[in-house]
């Protein structure tokens, strides 16, 4: 298996910690998950937004922009009852200690989170029924080179206002090219330029009620 190795302290993402154990990126001034319920947000936005777990069948391939704390992967592993695959693109991997501090906020995921951290240092490993591959580096370079096709996407980069390169039309077009027929996406943002880029990438895009303080989120299906 490929080796990630635990980031050196000087390479770790710089974080502030809010009440409740929420990590906030100082690079992007944005939290890694909702301040009012990270796991509930993941279930509402990314799982329900992609009609999961109902669509999960053996070999289903989920892809993600922004691994972060691994919360989405853990929530997916909690509901997956069949072997599936997940590929996650991440530019700034946390250290094991940072992951542990973030995971402490989700005691019901403790066993899966321990499994993830035990394998941290590899770019391919298993968490529950999820065979997870991490693709490290600038997603603008890595995604166009990727040979995979996803059945569903978690688009979970930092806010478009604070990390615009993660939502650039060229990157959204690459998401479309790497989506299987009938594939879907879900994201917490309803920013107009993101919705337009995803529509131009080949998706039928819809707004849905967002989570917490967010009025809307976006989901979509690749047009046939």
Image (cartoon, rainbow, N blue to C red):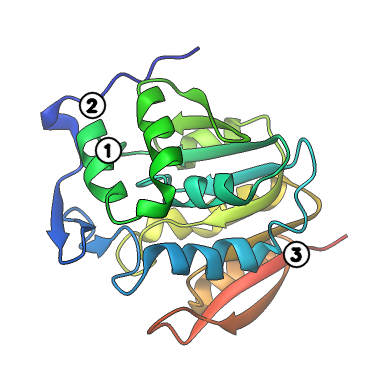
Disc 1 vs disc 2: Cβ atoms closer than 8 Å? yes
Residue 216 position within the rendered picture, expressed as x and y whole percent measured from the top left? 51, 83
**Label for residue 221?**
3
Image side of residue 120 versus residue 16, left or right? right
- The secondary structure type at the circle numbered 1 is loop
Q: Earlier in the sequence, mark 2 or mark 3?
A: 2
Residue 12 position within the rendered picture, expressed as x and y whole percent measured from the top left? 19, 36
Q: What residue is pinned by disc 2?
A: 7
Residue at the image point whose x is 41% and y is 23% from the top: 119
* Residue 90 visible in image: no
Image side of residue 56 versus residue 126, left or right? right
Name the quadrant of the C terminus: bottom right
Eyeballing the image, is 70 above or below 160? above
Determine the image quadrant of residue 116. top left
- The secondary structure type at the circle numbered 2 is loop
- Tell me the mark number nearer the camera, choosing from 1 and 3: 1
């Amino acid at each position: 298996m490929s080796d990630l190795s635990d980031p050196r302290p000087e390479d770790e993402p710089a974080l502030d910690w809010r009440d409740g154990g929420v990590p906030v990126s100082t690079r992007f001034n944005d939290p890694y998950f909702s301040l009012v319920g990270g796991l509930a947000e993941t279930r509402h936005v990314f799982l329900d937004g992609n009609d999961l777990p109902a669509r999960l069948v053996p070999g289903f391939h989920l892809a993600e922009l922004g691994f972060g704390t691994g919360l989405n992967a853990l929530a997916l592993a909690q509901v997956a009852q069949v072997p599936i695959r997940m590929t996650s693109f991440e530019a700034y991997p946390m250290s094991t200690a940072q992951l542990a501090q973030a995971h402490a906020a989700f005691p019901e995921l403790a066993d899966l989170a321990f499994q993830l951290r035990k394998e941290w240092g590899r770019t391919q490993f298993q968490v529950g029924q999820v065979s997870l591959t991490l693709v490290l580096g600038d997603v603008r370079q890595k995604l166009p080179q990727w040979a995979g096709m996803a059945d569903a996407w978690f688009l979970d980069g930092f806010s478009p206002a604070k990390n615009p390169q993660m939502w650039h039309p060229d990157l959204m077009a690459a998401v479309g090219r790497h989506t299987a027929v009938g594939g879907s996406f879900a994201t917490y943002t309803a920013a107009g330029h993101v919705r337009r880029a995803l529509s131009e990438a080949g998706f039928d895009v819809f707004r849905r009620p967002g989570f917490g303080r967010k009025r809307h989120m976006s989901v979509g299906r690749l047009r046939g």
